[in-house]
Image (cartoon, rainbow, N blue to C red):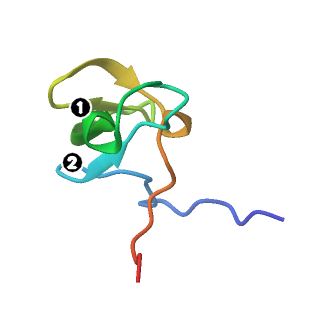
């Protein structure tokens, strides 16, 4: 069972890097699919530097804070 999200819990913050899932941008390597978050919108979507439109969490690879 999922815990309800607490106020302040967000999946992205301005300045962080996010990577589109390979299925969303086929034929591009990881570097070409990685962008910096410009703004977290009220809808929960994000706008990105150097990418048009608004984007939802499900379009991106899961954020891994510790890759060790």
Question: In this view of the protein, which residue sits in the foreground, 6 or 53?
Answer: 53
Instruction: From the viewer's perspective, tell me whether residue 34 is left or right of residue 15.
Output: right
Name the secondary structure under disc 2: loop
Q: Which mark is residue 48?
A: 1
Quadrant location of the C terminus in the rendered image:
bottom left
Q: How far apart are marks 1 and 2 (CA)?
A: 9 Å
- Mark 2 — residue? 14
**Residue 2's x, y, as percent?**
76, 63
Instruction: From the viewer's perspective, tell me whether residue 68 is left or right of residue 37.
Output: right
Instruction: From the viewer's perspective, tell me whether residue 11 is left or right of residue 40.
Output: right
The residue at the point 33 percent across, 46 percent down is 18
Q: Which of marks 1 and 2 is nearer the N terminus?
A: 2
Up the image or down, 5 lies above or below 34; here it is: below
Say which quarter of the image contains residue 47: top left
Question: In this view of the protein, which residue sits in the foreground, 13 or 20?
Answer: 20
Quadrant location of the N terminus in the rendered image:
bottom right
Q: How many circles with numbers are drawn on the protein?
A: 2
- Mark 2 is surrounded, within 10 Å at the Cα level, by few (under 14), some (14 to 19) or many (20 or more) other residues, namely some
Question: In this view of the protein, which residue sits in the foreground, 63 or 9?
Answer: 63
């Amino acid at each position: 069972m999922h815990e309800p999200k607490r106020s302040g819990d967000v999946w992205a913050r301005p300045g962080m890097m996010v990577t589109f899932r390979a299925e969303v941008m086929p034929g591009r390597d990881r570097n070409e699919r990685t962008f910096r978050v410009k703004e977290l919108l009220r809808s929960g979507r994000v706008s990105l530097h150097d990418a048009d439109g608004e984007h939802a969490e499900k379009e991106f690879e899961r954020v891994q804070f510790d890759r060790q």
